[in-house]
Image (cartoon, rainbow, N blue to C red):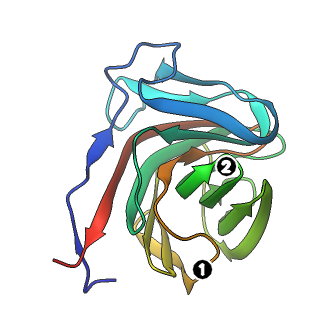
């Protein structure tokens, strides 16, 4: 993808101006499957950009939180995340080409399994595209980044590319956001996104 120019981020969201205990303005939260996810702004002294983070501390099959008013077909999405706890899972993820809570791509890193994985969700069913082993220590901030153009998808964790492949299950523009699984308690900060341009 190095031949493609990247526009500057349309926005980088650090959640520092949102009110604690609420969902940030212009974001929508929900869950694929069932459960009761709880996405809120909280203060975190370890935040990469202090003082606030967006944290998911409820439970659900696949909780998600997406930025409203965004429609990107080819571009980039990136976030810093810290997997804090969870008996079943300790995951932090990104979604893109999000058409709704039942149709989107997701890349996630898992501190319990020490891997990075790529999925597509279609009609509410998550399908695995690829798993790759990767070190994901818990209670540490990581950077997860996805670049996508056409069928090409690259997933990077902490500056290293772990997944690079072609997949065409979900096409066209969609929203971007963050994602967790099951009982993961995960903090997110410095969420950025932008569109690719060939100009």
Q: Which residue is located at x 31 percent, y 57 percent?
A: 194
Q: Which residue is located at x 36 percent, y 38 percent?
A: 48
Q: Residues within 10 Å of mark 1 (few under 14, many from 20)?
A: few
Q: Closer to the observer: label 1 or label 2?
A: 1
Q: Earlier in the sequence, mark 1 or mark 2?
A: 2
Residue 88, percent from left and from top: 84, 44
Residue 107 in the figure: left or right of residue 57: left
Q: Circle 1 sits on which residue?
A: 168
Q: Circle 2 sits on which residue?
A: 91
Which structural element holds mark 1? loop
Residue 145 in the figure: left or right of residue 120: left
- Using the image as rendered, state which of residue 46 and residue 74 is in the foreground: 74
Q: Residue furthest left?
A: 199
Between the C-alphas of marks 1 and 2, the distance is 24 Å
Which structural element holds mark 2? strand
Q: Residues within 10 Å of mark 2 (few under 14, many from 20)?
A: many
């Amino acid at each position: 993808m190095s031949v493609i120019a990247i526009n500057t981020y349309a926005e980088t969201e650090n959640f520092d101006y949102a009110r604690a205990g609420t969902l940030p303005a212009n974001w929508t939260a929900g869950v694929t499957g069932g459960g009761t996810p709880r996405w809120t702004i909280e203060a975190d002294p370890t935040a990469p950009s202090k003082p606030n983070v967006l944290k998911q501390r409820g439970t659900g099959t696949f909780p998600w939180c997406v930025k409203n008013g965004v429609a990107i077909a080819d571009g980039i999405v990136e976030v810093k995340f810290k997997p804090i706890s969870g008996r079943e899972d300790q995951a932090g993820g990104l979604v893109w080409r999000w058409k709704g809570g039942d149709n989107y791509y997701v890349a996630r890193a898992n501190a319990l399994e020490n891997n990075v994985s790529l999925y597509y969700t279609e009609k509410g069913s998550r399908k695995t595209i690829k798993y790759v082993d990767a070190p994901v220590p818990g209670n540490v901030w990581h950077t997860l980044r996805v670049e996508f153009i056409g069928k090409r998808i690259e997933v990077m964790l902490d500056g290293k590319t772990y997944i690079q492949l072609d997949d065409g299950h979900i096409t066209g523009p969609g929203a971007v956001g963050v994602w967790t699984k099951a009982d993961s308690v995960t903090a997110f900060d410095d969420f950025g996104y932008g569109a690719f341009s060939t100009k």
